[in-house]
Image: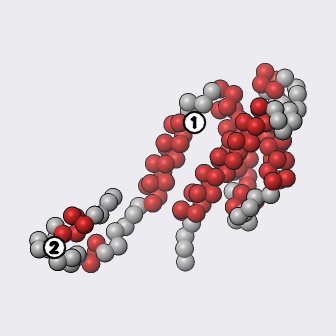
Amino acid sequence: MDFGQEYYHMFDGQGSGKIPFYMTYPVRNSFLEEAEYERDCRRLQEMYPRDARRIQTLVEQECDKMEHEGSMMFDEYPDRLLFRMLCRRICRALQDDEEMTRNVIPDRDHPLMQLIEVMLTQEMYRRRCRYRRCRRRY
C-alpha cells in the first residue's frame, strides 16, 4: 500500500496537510506479505529440475535443523568451515540416490558440490531475511 501525497490531501479538501490520526502510521501486514513471498518462492522452486528439487529438499531439511536462536545461520559472519561441512553432509545424504552421485564423493570444485553450496547459501539468505523482517522488536 502506497500512501502518497495525493491520498493524504483527499481528506481535508484544501491540501492543508492534516490527516486523520489513524492514518499517521499506516499498518503494514507484514505476515501476509511474508506468506505471499513464500508462495511465490515455492512456485518458482517447482520449476527446478528433478535433481535440483531433491537437493533443495535436503537443503531445507538441514536448514530446518539450524533454524534456532544462536545458530550459525543467523551469525553475522557464518563460519565457512561449518558451512562446507554442512554441504558435505548434504552430499552424503545424496549418496543414497546412486543415479545422481554414482557413489562418488565430489570435491569442492565438482559441479554437484557447487550446486549444493549455491542452494544452501540461497536458502540461508532467504531465512535470514525472513528472520529479520518477522522478528518482534520489544
Residue that mark 1 sits on: 45
Q: Which residue is mark 2?
A: 15
| Rendered image coloring scheme | secondary structure
Residue at (49, 42) in percent of width and height:
40
Q: Residue at x 67, y 51 (%)?
A: 124
**Rendered location of residue 59, percent (x, y):** 71, 42
Q: Quadrant of residue 48?
A: top right
Q: Residue furthest left?
A: 13
Q: Sequence order check: which comes first, mark 1 or mark 2?
A: 2
| Position in image of residue 47 (x %, y %) | 56, 30
Q: Position of residue 32 (x, y in %)?
A: 43, 55
Q: Which amino acid lies under the numbered mark 2 shown in the image of this protein? A: Gly
**Residue, x 29% and y 63% (percent of image)?**
3
Q: Is residue 15 above or below residue 127?
A: below
Q: Is residue 67 visible?
A: yes
Left or right side of 1 for 14: left
Answer with the quarter of the image where residue 79 lies. bottom right
Disc 1 marks a residue whose amino acid type is Gln
**Mark 1–mark 2 distance (CA, rounded to whole Å):** 47 Å
| Residue 69, numbered circle | none
Classify the position of the N terminus by image quarter: bottom left
Helix, strand or loop under label 1:
helix
Q: Nearer the viewer, mark 1 or mark 2?
A: 2
Secondary element at image label 2: loop
Q: Is residue 35 left or right of residue 119?
A: left
Q: Residue drawn 73% across and 52% down? A: 65
Q: Residues within 10 Å of mark 2 (few under 14, many from 20)?
A: few
